[in-house]
Image: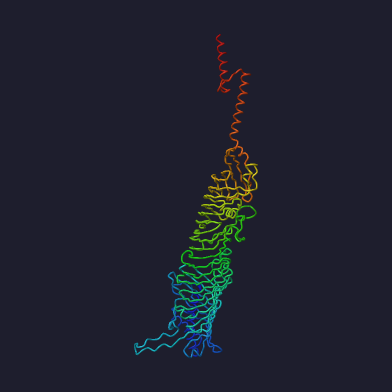
Amino acid sequence: MPETARLHMKFLTKIIGFVLVAALLAVGALFFLPGERIARIAAERISTMTGREVTMTGDTSISFYPVLGISTGRTTIANADWSSGGPMLEADSFKVGVDPVALIGGEVRITGLEVARPRIVIERDANGRGNWEIGVDGVAQSGQGSGGGAGGSGGGAAQSRALALTLDRALINDASVTYIDARSGTRQQMSGVSLELRWPDYNGEATFDLVLRPADQDVRFAGTINQLGPLIEGGVSPLDVTVSTDGGTLRLDGRASAAPQLDARMTADIDSTARFMGALGLPPADLPRGLGREVSATGQLSVTEDLRISLRDMTLGLGGNTLTGALDVVTAGPRPRITARLDAGALDLAMLSPDGDAPAGGGGGPAPASGDDGWSRAPIDASALGLADADIALTADSLDLGQFTFGAADIGLTIDNARAVATLRRLEGYGGALTGQAVANNRSGLSVGGDLEARGIDMERFLTDAAGITRFSTTGTMAIDFLGVGQSVHEIMNSLSGNLSVATGRGVISGFDLDRLMRTGDGSGGTTVFDQTGASFVIDGGNMRGDDLKMSMPLATATGNGRIGLGARDIDYLFTPVLLQGENSRGLAIPVSITGPWSNPRIRPDLEKAIDLNLREERKELEKKAREEVDREIDKFVEKELGVTRQEGQSVEDALRDSVKDQAVKELFKLFD
């Protein structure tokens, strides 16, 4: 039972005790005193018992038939002297009916109690003291009168007469309740509260039907308390309580005390967690499909006095996923802290993928927002990371993330102040295994990162799920560290930074035939077989760049360099195979340009680079021959037209300069002839 509801019950039983004593006084004097006098005596007596001022105004009427009883006017009970919340109770009227036969025998048996429109203040101060902590003088905790001890002064005091309090039916209608907690600084108000209580034996069973409205919706607490009197006195009692809201029901069957302490078998059948939590006045978290939108649960529930909650032998159905195991919740602190050891069997988390509630599994990579426009731009709501701290150990037979599917998993999850770290102790998938950790941090905007290593991975299946790349078939090892920031998948993928290294064994590239490319220049269709590959990339701004790809093939080697756009979902990469030199052949390089979107890249030979790589020596020889031919033609022209002969090793410019110089000297000497 929630703390507020427990306090309501405890307080109401105190009020019932006051009214019972007032009824005893009133009925005992009803044949001798008028109503106003009875009201004044009752108010004075209750004030003496409680230490709180009690006032009754208006007419106090007496009925003899068909029910013996009284009806008071407006009644007020003052609050504790340290309180500033106003009167502890105000009611328009009290109506009390008693059993006259029991009264003659010295017992007060209340056949009916009705409180009209009470306004109740329940308050706890900063030291934990409650304003309901008041007693009923002269009534022993067992419900019997306090007896004097034998052998006392004067030969022994007479034993007090038994005062057995019972209640056939109590009815409280349209109550308003204010709960003030100075320790937490909270103030809660409810209206429309009602209670029906049947308690025929003080030490026996009581049945109740309590309706609270913490969020303007009915929350019904109904059930039985086997020993209500001892429970009120601080003892332990068996109980069976069902909590019902518009969103579902929760049943507790076990033992409890007013401390509060609870040890009970819990059964929950909640068809809408959001509505159930909302009715209790809790934040109605919008949980993903399969993670608690609806809940069915069983387990052994324990609650300690400091509100530590534990659940053992738990089976928790989350609307598609089922967890078994145990968990503990510590409610003290800025956020609840959850410690759990869980087994999930087949765990479906496809709803956490970028396409959310879309059907799980399947290749082709995550669906873009529309058409092939890129990654989803829909905002990611990561507020759930801040609801609680956690230390959770999870095992599963299989794990479906929508975009990726895995086999057996052993994962540790810690959450600290909206930062979650998933440690992959064991995660089988794609024919191999993954280790490392992934991080999601929502402390000041969302960021995701990780440091992961995959060994023995089927690259075709993995790249198909990761990026829709279906042409690369091999088994390999991959290591990646990455960091992305943003409030959508689009922003995160376009901000990625980090490093990636890949090494593979024998495999096949489908979509182009390297042998045909080398022979005809057309490499479309077919496949290319390779023996091994290795490459490393640097990731920055959503782009992955690398220039050290090396691939060995039966008849060739290959290198590669360029850019893979993780954010833009495109590629601009130059793959250059070189035929191995043989006895009668030399190496032939045919660069292959791979450009365009991931979904449909264009693969074609780069002829300009092919000519540059393969005919470089021939071009140099042709350039040399052409230069020599030009020089010969220039020599002929200069000698024939200008009469200048070039010496060996002399340039045309030097020959002309020397010729002009010689002619100028000759003309100068003519001046002296």
Residue at 55 percent of width and 14 percent of height: 665
Q: Position of residue 426 (x, y in %)?
A: 50, 59
Residue at the far front: name it. Answer: 583
Q: How many marks?
A: 0
Q: Nearer the viewer, residue 644 or 479?
A: 479
Q: Examine the rendered structure and indicate whether residue 461 appears above or below residue 33.
A: above
Q: How is the image coloured?
A: rainbow
Q: Position of residue 484 (x, y in %)?
A: 54, 53
The answer to whether residue 251 is seen in the rendering is yes
The answer to whether residue 185 is seen in the rendering is no
Q: Examine the rendered structure and indicate whether residue 353 appears above or below residue 58.
A: above
Q: Position of residue 477 (x, y in %)?
A: 53, 52
Q: Position of residue 260 (x, y in %)?
A: 46, 73
Q: Examine the rendered structure and indicate whether residue 30 appears above or below residue 51.
A: below
Residue at the far top: name it. Answer: 673
Q: Quadrant of the C terminus?
A: top right
Q: Nearer the viewer, residue 177 or 639?
A: 639
Q: Nearer the viewer, residue 149 or 655?
A: 655
Q: Nearer the viewer, residue 105 or 463?
A: 463
